[in-house]
Structures are given as structure tokens and as C-alpha cells.
Image (cartoon, helix red, strand yellow):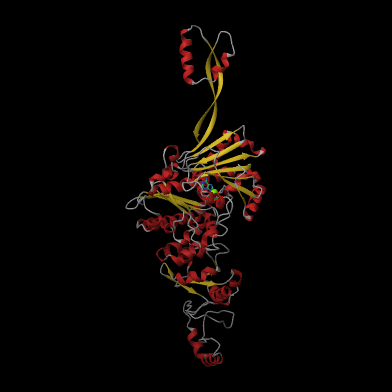
Amino acid sequence: RSSGEKFEFQAEVSRLMDIIINSLYSNKDIFLRELISNASDALDKIRFLALTDKDVLGEGDTAKLEIQIKLDKAKKILSIRDRGIGMTKEDLIKNLGTIAQSGTSVGFYSAYLVADYIEVISKHSDDNQHVWESKADGKFTVSEDTWNEPLGRGTEIRLHLRDDAGGYLEGSKLKDLVKRYSEFINFPIHLWASKEVETEVPVEEDESAEEESETTSTEEEKEEDAEEEDSEKKQKTKKVKETVHEWELLNDVKAMWLRSPKEVTDEEYTKFYHSLAKDFSEEKPTAWSHFNAEGDVEFKAVLYVPPKAAHDQYESYYNSNKANLKLFVRRVFISDEFDELLPKYLSFLKGLVDSDTLPLNVSREMLQQHSSLKTIKKNLIRKTLDMIRKLAEEDPDEVHDDDKKDMEKSGENDEKKGQYTKFWKDFGKSIKLGIIEDASNRNRLAKLLRFETTKSNGKLTSLDQYIKRMKKGQKDVFYITGSSKKQLEKSPFLERLIKKGYEVIFFTDPVDEYLMQYLMDYEDKKFQNVSKEGLKVGKDSKVKELKEAFKDLTKWWKESLAGENVDDVKISNRLADTLCVVVTSKFGWSANMERIMQSQTL
Ligand code: ADP
Ligand code: MG
């Protein structure tokens, strides 16, 4: 076996392994869910290929899509075997020697938390069986496998456990871990479990050496013996312990999303989220929606708002296509890279869709063009926006003034207090991007907007609340944009509006400038940027008089500023204490937009 080809890990892999071993040592258990999740991915891949070519599944045991775990106490080996797609020699070198695209997941290398030597035996239909092995010392070896039993197809990972990881040789411990972390894996996970059983065996009148060989005899022989002995009267028996092995199924493979939502507990939804999103933070998702769509296009879906935004959620928004929904067709996993299921602005959601309407035996490309996808997408958007709206409706912090008393009295929504503010902080930007991108849902999305205003006392408020508080005769919704609320509060544009009791929205996120180019009106109300031309605040008869009185001055002023990019000089009623102010023309960029554009070109 010294003939294997030797390789060095990519430098990043060695570093990752060090990090894993040094930082996750108190959380060793995770290795099992990582290896089971890899096995499940490999099984998904072969099952997907089998949709268009039945023959790839092979025959007999090889065709069984399952995961098997075996424990060898004597040799201290824990092995996990799948009948998935397997890896060629090249795959073994690439997949287990370098870090894949994301590089963020712990993955396969977490196995070194519990093992100091690992063998990966793998058989892919395009290649002979190979063994990858490494002691995590910066090197690994790959050899053609001429000594192990042929796998048929798939992968067996043999973990030679560290001295301090002997606990993982206990069947009961593994059963617990599978229950905890891998409950929703869609393939059967079997454990080669040992059981002590007591059997009664006959005792010879005089106990002799012969007796011992009886305990290892086969069932059949025992039965025969028993029959013989029956004829002999008053035969004595004694109990002996025997160890027997059998495959024990550890998980319930019925797809969770097929159950009725009424039968699924909150705890199960939370656990399902963790397994689906591969998020093991133990945090509860902020919201979920589980539904069944019937009619021309039938599908079931479970959608989740994650407990918090991914650290890079808004970093590469416009150049990433990361969709987070898994697509199943009749229980068969198809893909988690189906961008057609959700618009980009909802890419923060996690979940799955399982459709009975989509065809199974077509290529992914053809599926991508299937007309039902449009219907599914429309439905998913609507359900998502409903789910988010409900988050706000159930949040006592969101209920203002009059309705508040009733809710506070009941006290039953304490747990939901502040949940919408939290959602807004994490994913508010997505709602704004939605208003920009999705004209057909603009109004529904605008309902979900939250912001601070001159009257909100540091709290968030909504357009509906703003409109409820509008002054008599006020036609437009007033807003101002800038880099911070603190800066805006000093703005001369607000002086008179505040004095007269009008409320003005503060928009301080750079995306807000773009947002307001798309959000033209809401519930018959227009939006007016108070730093722009066209602000009308009630009636003021004095303006006409003043215009006449200062005619010469404004004329002189305008002429003096000619060539300074000033269109006009006007008498206005927008100010209170400040004498004059520069206003942007109706269709020009606001000063804040100038600022944003400048910072982007720099
Ligand atoms: P990830 O699962 O996030 O891709 P891992 O470190 O867990 O990262 O696995 C690395 C790669 O090794 C996988 O992407 C896959 O290509 C390959 N791999 C790991 N385990 C198996 C397996 N049991 N069968 C087939 N391929 C596997
Ligand atoms: Mg993995």
C-alpha cells in the first residue's frame, strides 16, 4: 500500500484544519452531521441523475439510497457509508484537498475533531475505486483500491478515532446525535447496532465443555436441539447472553413538509430550519410559513425568515445569484440553485418548495423554463409578504395609540414584542430593494416600510401611521433625505414645517434616494422631498405681497448668480428662522444624492 500518490493540502486547507481543531474542540459532535449531510448530498446527486437515466442506480444493494453507520469497538473505527454518487480519483484530490468556493463551511475536515487518521474509500461510475487517506499532517495520499471490498457505488469514510473520542463508539450516543442534528435527512440512516439478547439453552445433566459450543450454535440447530430435548423429560435450561447485530433505522424519512401544518410543533419547525439552512446556532427563525397550494399548479412550501441576516447579505447583492430555496419535484431533490423561484430581493429567505405539477424526467434547463414556475413564484412572493405583514400585526410594539390598550391588557403577545423591529433591522433593506425592483408588489411592500420621523421620538413608524396623523388639508407625505437623523434635524428645510406641526420622514439610508425615485405615491398620497422645489404648505397669502415687494432684489440676485448653476431665485414660505436656502429643482438630484453619487465615483 505504499504505492499511493502523495499530495499536499492547499495551504488554506491546512490552516482551516488548524482552526477547526483548535476552536471547535468543545463542539466535536458536529462532525457527524457534516458527514451525514455530505452523504445526503451525494445521494441527492445520484437520485437526480436517475430521473433521466434509471440505469445509473445499478442493481441490488447498490440501488438502495441509504446511509449506513458502523462501529468497530476493537479497532476504534467509526465508518459512514453512502450509496451516493461517489468520487473519482480526481474528485478526491480536488474536493478533499482544496477548499470549495465558499470556504465558509466547516464540512468534511471537521471529522479531524474526532479522528487522527481518516480513510475515504470511494467509487464513482466513471472510475475505479480509490482510497484517500490522511493524518491531517499537511499531506494526503490517493491510491487505487485493490484491498477493500468493492463498494458498488458511493463512499465510505473510515474515522480512526482519537483516544479521547472513544465515546463515539457507543451506539446510544450516535443515535442521540442523529436525532438531534440529522433528523430531517431524507434518506434512511441505519446503524449497525449491537444488542445483547438472552436466550435459554438446555443444560446437560453434568455441565461439560460441550455446553460452551452450544451458545454459538445457529438458531436452527438450537431448535433441533430443543425438539430432541423435549422428548427427554425434565430437561433443565439456563439463560445465556448473546450479542446480535442488526441494522437499526435512526430517522423518520417521511418528508416533514408533507405533514399538516397543524401537526407540526414550533420546535420541529425550528429544528427543520436548522437542518435545512445548515445553521446550528440553535436560534429560532424569526418567522415561517408552511402552506399547500392547490389548483392548476400544486406545490407545498415551507418558507423561513432566518433569525438574523447573513454577514454578507447585502455585500454582493447585485452580483450574486444566491437563491436559498430548495426545489423538490415529487419529493425528489432537484436543485438549490433555482433562481426562478424567488426574486432577488427575497434571497434572504430559506426554505423549500415541493411541486407535484413540475415534470420529473426533464433536464434542469428545461425545468427552468417551465411555465408553472411563474405561478409558483407569484404565490411564494405573496405568501412571503403575508408572513412579514403578520410579523408586524402581531408585534405589540407596532400597535400605536388607541389599539394599544387592548393588546397590552391581554398580554398574550409578549413573546412577539419587538419582533418586527428586529426583522426590519435585519432585512429592511430587502423590502426597499423590493419596492425598487418589483412594481407589481410595490404597494404591499410600501406597507412594510418603517422609518423615523420628526414626531416618532426615536421609534420606527409606518406610512399608514403617518397618514393617520396627517394634518387637516395636508396633501403630500413630507420627507427629507440625508446621511443621518442628527444632521437632518438641524436642516433649515424643516424649520417652518415643524413650527406648523407637520411631520417629516427622515430617510438616511443611501438606498432611500433610489427608493424614492420609484415610490411615487401611496394610498393616493404623493411624496414631497422638502428640500426640493414644489413644497406646498397650506395657504399663505403673504407670499404674493412679498413677491411684489422684493421683485427687484430677487431679480438682481438671480442676475448676480448667473453662471453659478442657479436656475432661479424665489420668495418662499418654507423657512422660519433661516434667511435663505438652496433648493434642488423638482427633477434634479437632491444634495444627498449628489453626496452619494460622489462617494461612489471616488
Ligand atoms: P461542502 O459539503 O460544503 O461542499 P465539504 O467539506 O463538506 O463541503 O465537502 C467537500 C466536498 O467533498 C463536497 O462538496 C463533495 O464534492 C465532496 N464530498 C464529501 N463527502 C462526499 C461523499 N460522501 N460523497 C461524495 N462526495 C463527497
Ligand atoms: Mg458538507
Closer to the camera, 582 or 572? 582
Residue furthest to the top in view is 233
Q: Is residue 198 left or right of residue 58?
A: right
Count of numbered tags: 0
Q: Is residue 362 left or right of residue 177?
A: left
Give the quadrant of residue 54.
Answer: top left
Can residue 502 be seen in this snapshot? no
Closer to the camera, 576 or 239? 239
* Quarter of the image with the C terminus in it: bottom right
Give the quadrant of residue 98.
Answer: bottom right
Residue 267 placed where, x, y %?
51, 43
For residue 538, above or below residue 150: below
Closer to the camera, 113 or 432? 113
Can residue 597 be seen in this snapshot? yes
Closer to the camera, 488 or 515? 515
Residue 380 placed where, x, y %?
41, 55
Residue 206 placed where, x, y %?
58, 8
* Quarter of the image with the N terminus in it: top right
For residue 438, above or below residue 115: below
Residue furthest to the front in view is 3
Residue 190 placed where, x, y %?
50, 36
For residue 535, above or below residue 256: below
